[in-house]
Amino acid sequence: MQIKYFASIRERVGRNDETRELPRSITTVADLLDHLSAEDESYAIAFADRETLRAALDQEHVELDAPLGAAREIALFPPMTGG
């Protein structure tokens, strides 16, 4: 799966994106966040405030409890503002 990081998430994990083979036990966005957070402190810090974290699977916004299904890409980012 291609994982893309944006804005402050990107700054905290120190990369724009990465490609990973995920264990079968990772079935939701939240599972992925837990998995990455357990691997490295920079991910744990980046994903600490789940209330404000946003995700998109194959460019469609989803909740963190959304199943990954057959998605090829996930994007993780803080809340967006603008006008």
Image (tube, rainbow, N blue to C red):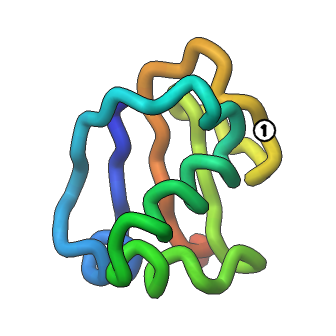
Question: Which residue corresponds to the image point at 65% horizontal and 84% vertical from the top-left?
Answer: 49
- Is residue 6 placed above or below 40 in the rendered structure? above
- Is residue 39 placed above or below 17 in the rendered structure? below
Q: Position of residue 40 (x, y in %)?
A: 34, 73
Numbered disc total: 1
- Is residue 57 placed above or below 39 in the rendered structure? above
Residue 58 visible to an observer of this rendering: yes
Query: Of helix, strand and loop, which one carries label 1?
Result: loop
Question: Which residue corresponds to the image point at 64% horizontal and 29% vertical from the top-left?
Answer: 68
Q: In the depicted view, which residue is nearer to us: 2 or 62?
A: 2
Q: In the drawing, does residue 33 fall left or right of residue 18?
A: right
- Is residue 76 placed above or below 58 in the rendered structure? below
Residue 82 visible to an observer of this rendering: no
Question: Which residue corresponds to the image point at 75% horizontal and 31% vertical from the top-left?
Answer: 67
Q: Quadrant of residue 22?
A: top left
Which quadrant: the N terminus?
Answer: top left
- Residue at which label 1 appears: 66
Q: In the depicted view, which residue is nearer to us: 46 or 24?
A: 24
Question: Which residue corresponds to the image point at 70% horizontal and 75% vertical from the top-left?
Answer: 50
Q: Quadrant of residue 6?
A: bottom left
Instruction: Please rate how many residues cluster around mark 1, counting C-alpha atoms within 10 Å: few if below 14, some from 14 to 19, many from 20.
Output: some
Which quadrant: the C terminus?
Answer: bottom right
Q: Position of residue 19 (x, y in %)?
A: 25, 35
Furthest-top residue in this view: 70
Q: Position of residue 69 (x, y in %)?
A: 66, 18
Q: Position of residue 66 (x, y in %)?
A: 78, 38
The residue under label 1 is which amino acid type?
Ala
